Image: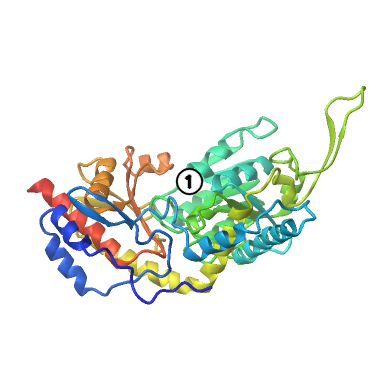
Amino acid sequence: MTAVLSAPLQASGTDAGHIESCVGPGLATSTESAARRRRIAPLARVVGADECVPSAAGPPVRYANLDYAASAPALAEVADVVQGSLAQYASVHRGAGHLSQVTTRRYEAAREVVRRFARARVDDNVVFTRGTTDAINLAAHATRGDVVVLDIEHHANLLPWCAPDQSGSSRVRVVQACDTIEDTLVALEAELASSPAALLAVTAASNVTGEVLPIGRLAAVAHRHGARILVDAAQLVAHRRISMVSHGIDYLVFSGHKLYAPFGAGVLVGRADWLDVATPYLAGGGASAQVAIGTDDESGADVAWHTGPARHEAGSPNVLGAIAIAAACEALADIGFESIGLHEAELTARLDDGLAGLADVTALRVFADSTDRVGIAGFDVDGLAPRAVAEHLSSVAGIGVRDGKFCAHPLLKRLGHPEGAVRASFGLGTCSDDIDRLIDALTGLTRARTA
């Protein structure tokens, strides 16, 4: 199921000329310079690649989607698999009918595909959820004891731990990340050594800057002090190969919609013991193995709950979402993470070089010693509100980026941008023309301010 393309997607015939006319002086020179550089084609076919959007002063232009970190477009193969599954879609697990049996097999097969993709242990649970946020809330529901987190986390990996556990105890301990990864590892080691903790919960890659953390080393720190580690891999799994066994990961969470499977599902993969003794995340059908109503001398119901993934998957599951995640895992494996890494490294270098050439633009970084990033770049344009920059890029150049605080308010504050910043992010469907268009539009915007 390969999706490698041999040529870049082409913009509409009016695209280049229109963009030149509306982003301001200096664009032609920048465009000519970009044309002399090597063109980078999309690495895979994504749904909506040729979508055109309105422009401020001319015909529609091809949409340059640079907002992959929020929600990546669906891979064409994933959309095809979902579409092909609809004709045989039925309820799962308790139906004797042929289509119910077919759908059940597909749903459970999706669980095994995810297990292999994550290189999980054979006895790990793979629980399908609504997304990363839901998966972390499930993990928080099942965790007893203190939880250590960094202050750079997305709110999804911060707020669930801040809530009291089922005993009513507050258990989160927030460690401030240092200026370097090395010093941050030392700070985490000291915190875990100071008092026992059940879990270290960390991001694998920052959703603000794209910087990748050394997950294997973080796992070793946690395990040295008797803690387990949960890794929020929402921003990593589409970009880098992960091995729960090799990296020493106890729990891994991620979302389909950042994995080119935007069909409303996510996963929690991890050790079964905590999950099997936790009360069901949702009470209802599917999670219950046996139910009896109390007698006149009793109240409520006597329930025997399942163990395993079913314990926390009450109700009718998002079967198509699970199938989509599995299809995306297989598609990424077919493309190969070496190819994905090379593609993104070339685009990242092109973007970084372009942003570095703009005097009014400042790139965001958390760590001075970070050497690896996924396809995410947070930046600020001096003197302009992030929303104003994003609106300009959209209306004038047909570019979609993110602006704001990216559900990471504490991090933006400590980086000196309490009002937010702008974020460009990209992936398999991105080509060099998209990056060049962003740099050209920012060049025109900054020059227009000084003209």
Crowding at label 1, few (<14), some or many (≥20) Cα neighbours within 10 Å? many
Q: Is residue 236 visible?
A: yes
Residue 286 sits in which quadrant?
Answer: top right
Q: Is residue 411 left or right of residue 139?
A: left
Q: Residue at x 51, y 66 (%)?
A: 77
Residue 36 at x, y = what percent? 19, 74
Residue 366 at x, y = what percent? 38, 51
Indicate the amino acid at tag 1: Glu
Residue 386 sits in which quadrant?
Answer: top left
Q: Nearer the viewer, residue 445 or 413?
A: 445
Residue 60 at x, y = what percent? 25, 54
Q: Residue at x 54, y 70 (%)?
A: 333
- At mark 1, the secondary structure is loop
Q: Is residue 107 left or right of residue 97?
A: left
Please give the count of numbered marks on the rendered protein: 1
Residue lying farthest to the top in this orientation: 296
What kind of colouring is applied to the model shown? Answer: rainbow
Q: Residue at x 64, y 66 (%)?
A: 116
Residue 278 sits in which quadrant?
Answer: top right
